Structures are given as structure tokens and as C-alpha cells.
Image (cartoon, rainbow, N blue to C red):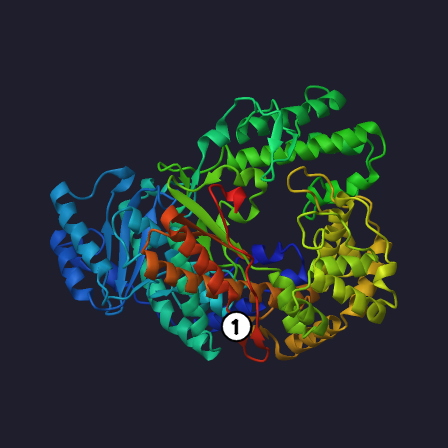
Amino acid sequence: MLALPSLHPAFLLRSADGAEGTSKFQTTVANDFRKAWALRKRRPLWDESVIWEKKNGRLINLFPDVSDVARFCREVVGHRITVDVETTGEHPLDCKLLCIGIASANGRAMCIPVLRQYGNRYWTETDQHQVFNFIRYLLRDPGTPKNFHNGSFDTVVLLAHGFPIGDLLTPWGDDTMQLHHVIDGELPHGLAYCSSRYLEIPYWKDDVKGDVRWLDLPDLVLRAYNLRDCLTSDRLIEPMLKEARKYDLEPLYRKELECCAIMTGATVRGIEVDLQRRDDPTPDPRAELTDKAGKKTPNPDYGRPLGLGPRLREDRDRALATMHAITGPGFNPRSQNHLRYLLFEKLRFPIVARTEKSGAPSTDKNAMVLLALHAKTEHQIKALEGLIKYRKADKMLGTWVEGLPVLYDNRVHPSWKLLPVTGRFSSSPNAQNFNSKIKRIFRAAAGHKLVSIDLSQAELRVIAYLAKDELLLRMYQEDINVHTANACMLFQIKARVLDPKAPLGWKDTNAATEAFLHEMCPQLLGLRYEDFAEMKGGAKWKATRTLAKNFVFGDNYGAEADTLFDVIRAKRDPDTDDLLFPDIDLATIQALKILWERIHHWIPVWWKRTTHETQRQGFYRSPFSGRIRFFRGGFQRNEMLNFPIQEAVAAVMNDRMIQISKYLVQTMGYETMINMQVHDALTAEAPERHVKLTKEIFEWVNAQPIEIPGIGTVHLPGDEATVGDYLDQV
């Protein structure tokens, strides 16, 4: 008997971080050996005879007729069914549906073909109408639980082809991919891995391995593969639910299913693209810009193309011209060999980093930051600037202009997945990385507005509660401007940037912040606030306050001084791509770290307690959601401190998204729907008549306190909800 491992040995041996990479899969390898030992003298406990059931020599569950489908639907209605689709692999709203596989808990299974090999129709028009009605009734029946492996994809495909699964935003029965994410978020969640971990099905994924297009696969191969997927997913449910219940994770799993259903609705809704703002080559005619107060300033983009695409091409061409002036016309910045020749031979830069696989000089983003510190000559400085600007413009063009998957409705429909280990959502294309230039091309539909809300300093608030930091908790309770107070204490400066609109006439401060600084600076620093230096110029204050924010967030994740130094000096302006803190040095970071941890001594105590407890019990359980992380790759300190904070914010966002979604549906039906969740921000698209109510719901839900076991009452409020026509306005 041949027993194949869950993961190929070559994959484990190629782990980038050596022993830590393989240690992540120690449990998997041990389980593989146990299974192999058990299978020495017997065959796997796997039965797929239902796939090969024959009638008059015909495989009725792979090549059914109308009567077979009708009988099958009658037999399985009311029983739990597991559904899997095979498609041509494009976007779930814009792909060809090849077949629908269904396996039932009562032992029945059938692959209902839609297309034959090479794309020919399987059914006559009359037969297809009957068959589709049978399937549509089965999938809509509320008494028949529907299960999936990756329902966020399959349900969208089915909806796009006229097979809705219940009501939009209603979670389906079970999802083995999501269930495995809750059980062990660090390990792979593919069906082959899960089945190897929990079942004894012989490996079947090689049946469709290779470059053969799905439409070109023989009908027998594709449909048998489809039914194996269905049978596997169906039989995974019970052992996986048993493990989830063992760790009391089923409530979190059910909550994740609700979140997935909401963001599946977001995939269907999508967000509109303003093609004119993306593609318009017309020069910007505005010599001046007027702000809301009526103040006029010169327009830096005067005469440049209005559209994002033409403007990025212009930026890329200018950057390339800058490099060609140094290298000659044959230089290709996309070629690693050309780049290495330019940087390390022609311009004589030192090699600051090497690639892990080949050991060749690195030219990635981090290496560019280090090289910038060594740029001395005019050619070195200009070449690096040109290269960075070229890469940024080229990447944005490829992703958001030329490669943007705009469908027939002029909308982008990101596919949202709740699979990161922290419980956050990810999306494809990556909606989490929109900068202000990209946001300008996304808009609400005509007669609609975008409504958005962000949690207010969520991560720093979570740290305050987890660490029981009395000073931070007091600052939040008394409405003190935390980032301003931190900047003033860390750099011994006053918040005295003039702003006639502000209550005190100064920017970024209020009476509570001023009183706090006057009271606490002598106690915490031994210095009087009134003796601090005045900050000259708004730009300098903004940079100092931003530096304080970046430092505080980095240090609160437990980063060492040298790591903080590398991270902070690599920070770039998201719009100009200029380094934000080019003059920062390690000594400054070390001094800030000592001062911050002396003032907030509760935080280092929390670091020590958290890392000790996590290693002692072998995992970390979040008090906010109950989510468990086993740290399969080893108990790395930064991971043990990052995870509790990011997971807590994600848990709060997911809970509030569920509440908000329910209120939106109850009050406005499906006219107003959440269409984006980006870390600690939610966005919905609402008809103009619903904007006020949507805004009120967003703000009310995010103002509610939360009771957390072991912590108490937690306040993680949202900022004021914003409304706009375009994504860059909210």
C-alpha cells in the first residue's frame, strides 16, 4: 500500500526559514507517519462506489439524464448536501460553469453537467430548463442544509448562473475551508490537505494536474474529480466539527460563516470604476485649487493628464528617461540582470542584502531603502529616485489600470476571504492597499453615496486594555489627543501649531490634552510642559507627530530598537513615495524606546506575561473571540505580541460588521450593503435617501461598549462616519 504524505518532502526541505519553516508542519508529518503505519496491512477506509453506480451500462451519477436528476433531487431534499462547482477559473461572476457536484449525507451523490468537453452543451434546451429548475429548487430549499469547501467562491458562481443559495447575506450550512481556518489558522486550508489530515481518501488531485484547460478535460475525469471533491467535503464535516467543539471554537466558526456571507454579498455588489478618471488623457486645466474654506493654492498637477492611467504612464516614462540618461537607451528596469549591473557595477553601490535562494545581490523594496542611505553621487541619487518612481508607477498601472478586472457592469468585484491567521479579511484584487490616487477612480453609483467609518486608534486602545496601561486608559477616557500627547512627551515639544479653526487656536490639541501635559510631564519626565520648546511650522509638527505615531505602534508590538529603526526609516509617503524620516538614526530610536517603556511600564510587563503564558500552555487564546493560535512555526516573540492585538481588532470589526449588516437589511432591505472591509474600516454603498440612516447605524453600533472576559468593559469607538461620492472622500 502506497501512502502519500500531505505535503511533498521537497516543499518542506525548501522552507525559506529552515528549521522554523519545517517545524510549522511537524504535526502534519507525525500524522502522516501514523496513517502510513495504520495502512501497512489494510486498504484505506474510503468508499466512492456511489460515483461508479451504473444503470444499463451507463454511469448515471456522472452522465445523468433528466429522470436521474429528478430522482436524485427527490432522494436528497431535506438531507444535508455538500456542493462543489467546476468552472473555467476566471472571476466567479464571469466564468463558465462546467458542472455542479452534490453529495448528500444519506449516501447519494451526482455530478450535474452543464457543459461537455470543449464547451459543448450537455443538455437540450428543453431538458436543461427542467434540470436547472430541479437544482434551483433543491438549492433554494430552506430545509436542505447546503455545505461547501470555499463557499465564498462557489456561492457567487452559482448565483451568477441563476442558482442562489437561500437569501443573499444568509450563511450557508457548513464550510470545511472556513472550519479548518478556525481550527488551525496557520496550516493550509486546501481540500487535499484537509482530507489528508482527517480522512483516508487516496490522493485524487493529480487527476487534473497540469496545464490542460478545464474545458479540455475528458468528461469522465472532470466529473469523477468533482464528485470526489463533494464526497471529501461532506465526510470532513463531522471530524472537523468534533475538533472545533473540543476547543470550544464552534461559536467562532458560526460567526465566521456570517462574516463570509456578508463579504460574499460585497463581492457581488462590488464598487464602480470611474473610467473617465482612470483613462482621461485631457490635460488638467486648473491652475489653482480651492479648498472647502475658499482658500486657493497652486495646482501641482496643472497641465498633467486628468486620468490615472495616462498620468502613471507619464510618470513611468519620465522615470525611465531619468535612468536612460545614466545608463543609455538599452536599460530595462524590469530585468534583474540590468538592475544589478546598474546598481552594483556601474554606480558602485555596496551589496546591502542578498536573495535567500540564490544569494544574488537583492534589488527588492527593502534593499532600495538601504541603498538610499549609501547614495552619495548625483547619478546614484537620481538613478535610485528614477527606479523607485518607475516601479511604483509600473506596478500601479499593471494592477489598477491595465490589469484591473472591470466587469460588464463597470464595477470591480473583489473576492473577499477570511483566511489570514489574525481573522482579518483579505481580498483579490487587494483592496487593502488602495492609496489616495487609486481611491479617486472608485465611486458610488449614480444616486448613491459611499458611507465609511474607521475605528479610532483601535490597535493602541486594544494594547491599553490588554496591558492594563493605566495612563493610556486614562487618556482615552478623558478625551485626550493621544498622538499629540505622545509626540509632546517623547520629543519635549509643545503642540503650538496655529490653527484659527481649532478651539484653542492650535492644531491637534484640546483643553484636556493641555491640562494632562501640564499635570503629567513633571511626574513622568521631571520636566515642566511650559518649558518645552515651541514647534516652528506646521510641516515640522506634522512630521514629528507622524514619527511619534509610527514609533509608538512599532514599539507596542515588541519590536527591538534595530528592527524599529529599519521599519521607520523605510516608511514612505504613499502619494509621493519620498522617505518620511530620512534623517532618523538608531540612537534616537533607542532613546525613544527607553523613554516610552519607562512611561508605559505596564506594556513591557504585558509582553513578558503574554510570551510566558503562550509558551507554557502551547497556544494563545484570544479573550475577544476565543480564537486559538498554536504558533506552529515556533514561538517567535514578535508573532506572540502581534497576534493578540491584530486579532482583537479583527474580532471587533467582524462582530460589528455582523450587527451593522443586520440593521441595514432590517431597515433598508438589500438596497444598502457593505461592500468593503479594510482592516479597521467599513464602507457601504447607500441610496442617497438612506445615507443619513446608514451613517447613524454605523456610528451607533461602533459606539457600543463590549464586555470581554478577563478584561471587563472595553470601548473601541469609531470616528465620525464620512460620506462621499468617491472612495478618496470617505
Can residue 508 be seen? yes
Residue 456 placement (x, y as % from top left): 59, 60
Name the foreground residue: 47 vs 620.
620
Name the foreground residue: 182 vs 55.
182
Characterize the local packing of mark 1: few (<14), some (14-19) or many (20 or more) Cα atoms within 10 angstroms: some
Where, by quadrant of the figure, is residue 39 drawn? bottom left
Q: Relative to 404, say whether 11 is above or below.
A: below
Can residue 414 be seen? no
Residue 21 placement (x, y as % from top left): 63, 60
Q: How many marks?
A: 1
Q: Relative to 386, say whether 519 is above or below.
A: below
Residue 631 placement (x, y as % from top left): 61, 68
The answer to whether residue 480 is left or right of residue 491 is: left
Q: Residue at x 25, y 42 (%)?
A: 116
Residue under label 1: 706
Where, by quadrant of the figure, is residue 149 drawn? bottom left
Residue 519 placement (x, y as % from top left): 79, 69
The answer to whether residue 192 is left or right of residue 434 is: left
Q: Relative to 34, say whether 414 is above or below.
A: above
| Mark 1: amino acid | Ile
Q: Residue at x 34, y 42 (%)?
A: 95
The answer to whether residue 440 is left or right of residue 258 is: right
Q: Tell me the SS state at disc 1.
A: strand
Where, by quadrant of the figure, is residue 111 drawn? bottom left
Name the foreground residue: 156 vs 690.
690
